[in-house]
Image (tube, grey):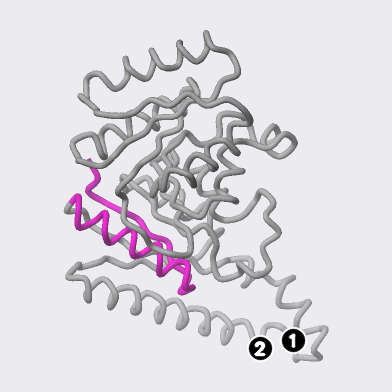
């Protein structure tokens, strides 16, 4: 059961949408919300400011560092005040926290105190995103000890849910997580498994039935063939899916970087929220 939800926020429109999802889940589960803003420590490091001051002909960096830090602190306070106000408008009381450090690391560390992280697919620098691995969101998914809900730019209710299963430990954890979160709801749930081999498909279907049995989950099992991430996204689009639930990264970072991964591909391409579990 979800009782504490962590929502990182940078004040961008996308993080405001993440708050919409987090608030809806908080109301559904009667959970506590914490808004977290992390001041990127790299913006306060000497080499970064030294390069700026040198190129623009500023006085020595020491004269500007305290003022620059104060600007970042004030901005973080403003972002968190806006977060609290939006929660209050929804009848929710939120905690807020301001920290300084490496953003993804701080979020993952704070996630230990929650049952769910809700984070936007893209942040304030979306226009400069290259789409490569290494973004804050993907780093959080890799490091978070709890499930992570990655949200798109627009909000939609969870009426039809797709759970992707491939037999890995991560997808098994995701399936159990989905059962615990939504097993008692009246939502339409479809569990898809992608395999070129009919025998493997039957084996996956049997595993799904075994895992879901204790939860008395009502679902439609769907066997797909083809390239897993593309088939999952195609099925989601054709069937008006509102939420995808799946395992996170089942290989090491080097494997994902060279060969790609189903989770990383779907995080980048999906226009609907994705709940990922390690």
Residue under numbered circle 2 = 63
Residue under numbered circle 1 = 60
From what the image shows, is residue 228 above or below residue 18? above
The region drawn magenta spans: 1-29
Locate the N terminus and report the quarter of the image it occupies: top left
In the rendered picture of this protein, how many numbered marks are placed on residues? 2
Q: Residue at x 45, y 83 (%)?
A: 74
Q: Residue at x 61, y 55 (%)?
A: 135
Q: Residue at x 52, y 84 (%)?
A: 71
Task: Check residue 220 in the rendering and tell me which mark sits there, or answer none.
Answer: none
Disc 1 and disc 2: Cα gap in Å? 6 Å
Frontmost residue, 230 versus 274: 230
Magenta span has 155? no
Q: Residue at x 58, y 66 (%)?
A: 41
At numbered mark 2, what does the secondary structure look like: helix, strand or loop?
helix
Q: Position of residue 154 (x, y in %)?
A: 43, 64
């Amino acid at each position: 059961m979800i009782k504490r939800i962590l929502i990182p926020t940078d004040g961008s429109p996308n993080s405001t949408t993440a708050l919409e999802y987090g608030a809806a889940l908080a109301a559904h589960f009667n959970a506590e919300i914490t808004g977290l803003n992390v001041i990127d420590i790299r913006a306060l490091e000497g080499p970064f400011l030294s390069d700026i001051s040198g190129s623009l002909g500023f006085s020595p960096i020491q004269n500007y560092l305290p003022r620059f830090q104060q600007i970042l602190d004030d901005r973080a306070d403003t972002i968190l005040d806006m977060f609290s106000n939006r929660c209050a408008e929804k009848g929710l009381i939120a905690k807020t926290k301001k920290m300084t450090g490496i953003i993804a690391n701080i979020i993952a560390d704070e996630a230990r105190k929650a049952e769910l992280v809700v984070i936007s697919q893209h942040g304030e620098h979306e226009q400069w995103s290259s789409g490569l691995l290494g973004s804050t969101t993907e780093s959080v998914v890799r490091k978070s000890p709890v499930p992570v809900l990655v949200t798109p730019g627009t909000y939609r209710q969870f009426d039809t849910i797709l759970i992707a299963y491939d037999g890995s430990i991560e997808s098994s954890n995701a399936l159990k997580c989905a059962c615990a979160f939504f097993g008692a709801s009246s939502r339409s749930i479809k569990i898809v498994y992608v395999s070129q081999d009919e025998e493997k498909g039957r084996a996956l279907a049997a595993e799904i039935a075994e895992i879901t049995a204790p939860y008395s989950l009502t679902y439609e099992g769907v066997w797909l063939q083809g390239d897993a991430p593309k088939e999952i996204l195609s099925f989601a689009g054709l069937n008006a899916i509102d939420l995808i639930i799946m395992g996170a990264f089942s290989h090491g970072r080097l494997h994902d970087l060279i060969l790609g991964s189903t989770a990383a591909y779907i995080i980048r391409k999906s226009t609907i929220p994705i709940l990922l579990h390690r």
